[in-house]
Image (cartoon, rainbow, N blue to C red):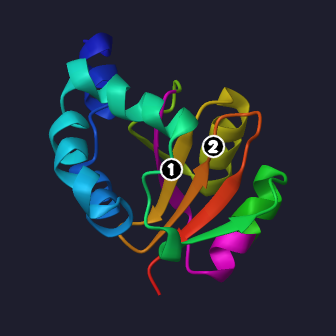
């Protein structure tokens, strides 16, 4: 029974993922993202792209310094982030909703390209693979 609960908790949140793709991913990549993210066999292909490729709309991305989880959470809260965030990335926290700072800490600790979706389709944090570890706020303004 415990294994079933874990699997349910790890089920991708289509609200966050679809809104993220439709708002922040460049148009020519959207259909591939929308097809692959919900497919467990293909999900890793998309998540691994975030290590090396920037498939996001540049006008909606603002580079910021890579600081601590608490500092990044403060920046996101000033832009409208709430208490919880949804992690999309190649880590043990993938497809999980966590407290905002925990989600950011998990993304920082993994070292892989990760998105922390704060407000579906409106606000997210993208942490590129470390190094170089570039960090961006993705915001629909």
The quadrant of the rendering that contains the N terminus is: top left
Asked whether disc 2 touches disc 1, contact meaning CB atoms under 8 Å apart, the reply is yes
Q: How many discs mark residues in the rendered view?
A: 2
Res 20 seen here: yes
| Residue that label 1 marks | 54
> Which residue does the image show at 77% across and 33% down from the upper left?
131
Foreground mark, 2 or 1, reads 1
> Which residue does the image show at 46% across and 28% down from the upper left?
48
In what element is the residue under mark 1? loop
Q: Position of residue 106 (x, y in %)?
A: 64, 36
Res 18 seen here: no
Q: Which residues are magenta?
A: 75-90
Judge whether residue 84 is colored magenta: yes
Q: Quadrant of residue 19?
A: bottom left
Horizontal side of residue 129 vs 42, given as left or right: right
Q: Position of residue 74 (x, y in %)?
A: 75, 70
Q: Which mark is residue 109?
A: none
Q: Position of residue 129 (x, y in %)?
A: 65, 35
Q: Nearer the viewer, residue 69 or 53?
A: 53
Q: Position of residue 112 (x, y in %)?
A: 61, 31
Horizontal side of residue 64 vs 96, given as left or right: right
> Which residue does the image show at 65% across and 48% down from the upper left?
104
Horizontal side of residue 61 vs 22, given as left or right: right
| Residue that label 2 marks | 128
In what element is the residue under mark 2? loop
Q: Is residue 62 above or below residue 89?
A: below
């Amino acid at each position: 029974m415990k294994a079933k609960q874990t699997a349910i908790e790890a089920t991708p949140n289509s609200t966050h993922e679809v809104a993220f793709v439709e708002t922040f991913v460049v148009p020519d990549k959207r259909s591939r993202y929308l097809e692959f993210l919900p497919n467990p066999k293909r999900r890793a292909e998309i998540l691994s792209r975030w290590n090396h490729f920037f498939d996001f709309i540049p006008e909606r991305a603002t580079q910021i310094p890579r600081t601590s989880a608490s500092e990044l959470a403060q920046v996101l809260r000033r832009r409208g982030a709430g208490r919880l965030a949804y992690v999309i990335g190649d880590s043990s926290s993938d497809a999980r909703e966590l407290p905002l700072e925990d989600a950011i800490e998990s993304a920082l600790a993994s070292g892989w390209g990760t998105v922390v979706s704060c407000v579906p389709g409106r606000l997210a944090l993208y942490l590129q693979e470390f190094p170089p570890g570039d960090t961006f706020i993705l915001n629909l303004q």
